[in-house]
Image (cartoon, rainbow, N blue to C red):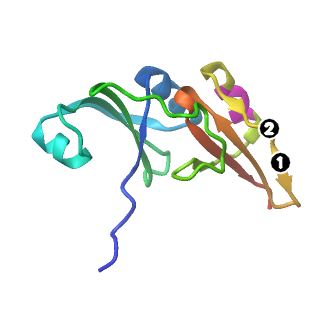
Amino acid sequence: MTIQRMDNVGIVVDDLDAAIAFFAELGLELEGKAQVEGSWADQCVGLDGVRCDIAMMRTPDGHSRLELSLYLSPVVIAATPQNPPHNTVGMHRVMFSVDNIEDVVARLRPHGAEVLREIAQYEDIVRLCYVRGPAGILIGLSQQLS
């Protein structure tokens, strides 16, 4: 049996409103917000006493989603080291294809975004950069040139 699709990518944040604003500025649409709790949530994530505010963000094409989660109980645990480098084991970024990489970076800066080093160009094919946003979230931006 094969999978049907990738449903969403989950990101735990420490400020849900800031994360929603960041991804909305990027172009994702807020599908909805909810609070989850109860034994089914405990069983699913392997924690006890889960109470979590979530927001589901959808990409403009409707095919991809981010689930942003703010744990109220148990409280969020800060990642160490804070803002880990890209070569840290585990999931490290979500990549988005954009039309104008400079414009996107400029619009995200007021939301706390910082380009890790600079926008890089590979031949005449693509421009890429990694951006760190709220709660240390790392995203990639890619602009096709040809």
Name the side, left or right, on which 144 lies relative to 51: right
Q: Are marks 2 and 1 in contact (CB under 8 Å)?
A: yes
Amino acid type, residue under disc 2 in the picture: Arg
Give the x, y percent position of residue 25: 57, 29
Q: Which of these two is toward me, 2 or 73?
A: 73
Residue wearing tag 2: 117
Residue name at image x 74 percent, y 41 percent:
101
Q: Which of these two is toward me, 2 or 136?
A: 136
Eyeballing the image, is 124 above or below 140?
below
Q: Can you tell which mark lies on residue 120?
A: 1
Residue name at image x 63 percent, y 22 percent:
112
Instruction: Say which quadrant the C terminus sits in.
Output: bottom right
Would you say residue 122 sits in the magenta stretch? no
The residue positioned farthest toward the bottom in the image shown: 1
The residue positioned farthest toward the left in the image shown: 39
Eyeballing the image, is 55 above or below 101?
above
Q: Secondary structure at mark 2?
A: loop
Residue name at image x 70 percent, y 46 percent:
99
Q: CA distance from mark 2 to mark 1?
A: 9 Å
**Region rendered in magenta:** 103-108
